[in-house]
Amino acid sequence: MSWLLSPYSEARTYRIAVYLLMGLGLGVLDFTLLVTGFSLGLGLLVTIIGIPVLVATFLVARGLATLERRLAVLLLDAPMPHRRMVAPEEGGLKWRRLRSLVASRRTWSEIAFLTLRLPLSILDFTFIVTVIALALGGSGWLIAVAAGAEIEIGSWTIDTIPEALIYLPVSIVFLLVGPRLVIAWGDLSARVATRLLGRIDADEMKREIVDILVRRERADGFAILEDLGLRLGQGSFLTPTRVEAALLALESSGHVTVGREGLHTTYELA
């Protein structure tokens, strides 16, 4: 019984409920801005105006994704990578940076989340409202009938206490299991958010590894993985397989050389 009731004393339960309730408004905002921006930009490509509109839409998408990422961390406890501020290049926003923004898999992953935010938020809102209604409906019916009100469900009119008690067992069940259902749904939402918003591009991973090797001069894979965990945080975005792939890419491009130190494979900058 304590396992069922303990979520009532956990702040995370209420934070998840807030996330599910407020998601509908954000989903409408995200979907509207993206669809309007891309439709207008693509429609105006025949003129010079279309390009700045598309660029602005990509930048808006990046800003909305940052907002969604922070909400997922604060309300869902979703693991997200910690990103360092990168100093802008001299000369402002150049074509190379714009091309990198458009071609980045992270950008398109964020756009995918923002596009799916509306249908997902509809599911979230429907779920949380249904759970709350089922949990509080029984006592609500009793209070309403006791106050002299009549409740009509189709052709059935509930106007007596015994009739109102029929729904009470269902309400009690959802009062007990509802918070656990909310937490489970929040965990699923956190996984979706981390999957689409917590992406670390290969270039970003390689840049972090190079910076680690600059500081350490030489390190094995375990030390590099540990340092990356301290820099970026822990989550599905950071796995030994991804780190190994980044190291192999750096080795094949000639940026990193591989050596042996006892039984360990070590890496250092070329």
Image: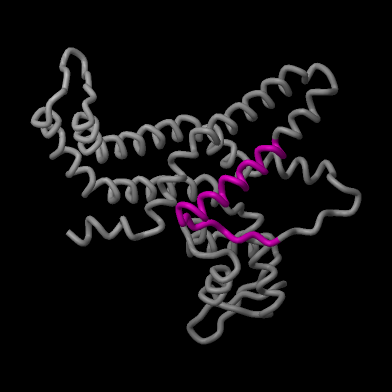
Q: Is residue 202 above or below residue 49?
A: below
What residue appears at the point 21 percent right and 49 percent down from the top-left corner? 176
131 horizontally vs 253: left or right: left
Q: Nearer the viewer, residue 128 or 63?
A: 128
Percent coordinates x, y for residue 152 in the rendering: 22, 18
Outermost residue, right direction? Answer: 91
Q: Quadrant of residue 233?
A: bottom right
Outermost residue, bottom direction? Answer: 262
Magenta stretch, main secondary structure, is helix
Q: Quadrant of residue 56?
A: top right
Percent coordinates x, y for residue 85 in the rendering: 72, 59
Percent coordinates x, y for residue 36 in the rendering: 66, 23
Q: Which stretch is magenta?
A: 58-84
Q: Is residue 26 above or below residue 153?
A: below
Q: Quadrant of residue 227?
A: bottom right
The quarter of the picture where the N terminus appears is bottom left
Q: Is residue 193 above or below residue 35?
A: below
What residue appears at the point 34 percent right and 51 percent down from the top-left corner? 183
161 horizontally vs 199: left or right: left
What residue appears at the point 60 percent right and 68 percent down from the top-left corner? 231
Q: Nearer the viewer, residue 240 or 130?
A: 130
What residue appears at the point 55 percent right and 29 percent down from the top-left corner? 28
Outermost residue, top direction? Answer: 155
Outermost residue, left direction? Answer: 162
